[in-house]
Image (spheres, rainbow, N blue to C red):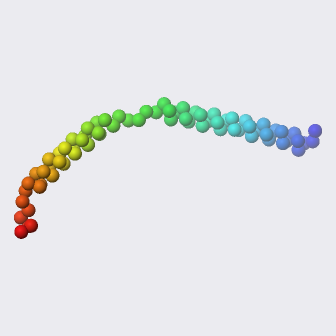
Amino acid sequence: MDIKIISGILAVFVTVGGLFVQVGTVMNRLDVLETKSAPDISPIKTSISDMKSAIAVLETKINKLENPLSN
């Protein structure tokens, strides 16, 4: 066998090995991402709904007031 053929075969093996290593790191990263959980946002949702009701009350109070500058 010629040195070019041997080096070509060796390059193919190194490339395939590198691909396996890269796939392993990607799979590891995916496993880490899958284990993470999203934060609980239910307190924020209740706070927003409370603020919306307070804004509605304030809007009704503002609408009941007379604007002295509108005359």
Which residue appears at 24% of the width and 41% of the height?
Answer: 49
Query: How many labels, in total?
Result: 0
Quadrant position of residue 66: bottom left
At x 85% / y 41%, what residue is drawn? 7
- Percent x, y for residue 52? 22, 45
Residue 47's image quarter?
top left
14 on left or right of 3: left
Image position, residue 12 (x, y; %): 79, 40
Q: Residue 2's x, y, as percent?
A: 93, 42
Q: Quadrant of the N terminus?
A: top right
Q: Could you tell me which residue is drawn at 15 percent across and 52 percent down? A: 59
Q: Is residue 38 left or right of residue 18?
A: left
Residue 14 vs residue 27, the one in the foreground? 27
Percent position (x, y) of residue 3? 90, 42
Task: Left or right? Give the position of 16 relative to 28.
Answer: right
Q: Quadrant of residue 44?
A: top left
From this view, report whether residue 17 is shown above or below residue 69.
above
Task: Point out the residue furthest to the bottom here.
Answer: 71
At x 56% / y 36%, what residue is drawn?
29
In this rendered view, identify the residue nearer to me: 50 or 64.
64
Q: Quadrant of the C terminus?
A: bottom left
Q: Residue furthest right?
A: 1
